[in-house]
Amino acid sequence: MVELDPFVLRRALWLRHVRWLTAADLPDLALLAENLTEVHFAAGEIVAAAGVAPCALHFILDGEVGIDGRRWGPGSVVGALEVFARRPLTNSLLAIQDTRTLQLTSNDLFEILEDNFAILRAALRGFADGMPPPPPLISLPVLGDPLGFVERLTLLRDQPTFVGARLDALAELAHASQEVRFAAGSAVVRLGDPAISSFMIVEGTLIGPHGDIGPGHTIGALETLAERPYRATIEARTPVRALESSANAIFDVIEDHPDLGMAMLASFASTISEHHA
């Protein structure tokens, strides 16, 4: 193992406490740590201005910052959701008292994520783990039997998780995805089993812990990305047809097309921001 500079190591260990970085290894965190810059803000100074997407996120070392009546102190991260979602702040983020932060610019963050698949994967795991369940698609296109490539691509393109993704990356994932069928009474996923695939329901009805699940719903997507066990047992009430995307296929495509992972992070950050608004 490469020995890390003690100064960088201390910062890398601090980064490990950030929720969306807990799955990253120390050598990978060191790449982020090396790009952190310590900055100081006097009480009342603007940390990030309203009306524009923040150009950096901040890890608070000491002091306090606030916006819209909310406040964050040491150990908190501010600006991350807006940076990932590339969304402007509605009001300025201010230093409530003299504050010291470690700043990571959006340019450095995106460059590192594009060049380092391990950090990108860790960030996806962290964000997916904190996501609310995805809404079903309101309507499905007319689909053939079996699903052709264009139909698989259309289903993937319409999923909220892939909003903003480039077509070439989704085309590669469509090639790697497959149609699967489940007989009535069979389990599609089981509580506690490793999440190895997500399933986009095309036809049929399933029963889950909160009632029936039908066409347009996606099962296991967040657990698959977060690399967690399935959160519930879901069984087919009727014969079911679905589009399966395996974890291996998803991460292989993201490794080849990091812009897909970046688009997914932007989607997650935007959803979480709206959920907590």
Image (spheres, rainbow, N blue to C red):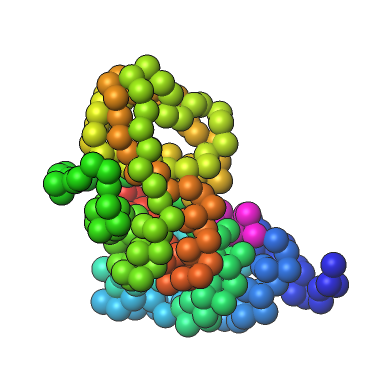
Residue at 33% x, 39% y is 242
Which residue sits at x=38%, y=38%?
A: 180
Relative to 204, say whether 134 is above or below.
Answer: below
Which segment is the magenta one? Answer: 18-24
Q: Position of residue 161 (x, y in %)?
A: 34, 55
Q: Position of residue 260 (x, y in %)?
A: 41, 67
Vertical placement of residue 275 versus 88, above or below? above
Q: Nearer the viewer, residue 250 or 107?
A: 250
Q: In the rendered image, which quarter is residue 163 located in?
A: bottom left
Q: Is residue 229 above or below residue 67?
A: above
Name the side, left or right, on which 190 lies relative to 244: right
Residue 146 lies in the magenta-colored region: no
Residue 97 pos. (x, y %): 50, 70
Quadrant location of the N terminus in the rendered image: bottom right
Q: Is residue 36 visible?
A: yes
Instruction: Identify the residue at horizontal 31%, vertical 49% (top origin).
Output: 275
For residue 152, side relative to residue 228 (left or right): left
Q: Image quarter for residue 71?
A: bottom left
- The quarter holding residue 205 reads top left
Total marks shown come to 0
Q: Please tell me which residue lies in front, 248 or 207.
A: 248
Q: Is residue 211 left or right of residue 80?
A: left
- x, y percent for residue 10: 75, 68
Q: Answer whether residue 109 is visible to the viewer in this image.
A: no
Q: Identify the residue at horizontal 42%, vertical 72% (top origin).
A: 259
Q: Nearer the viewer, residue 146 or 151?
A: 146
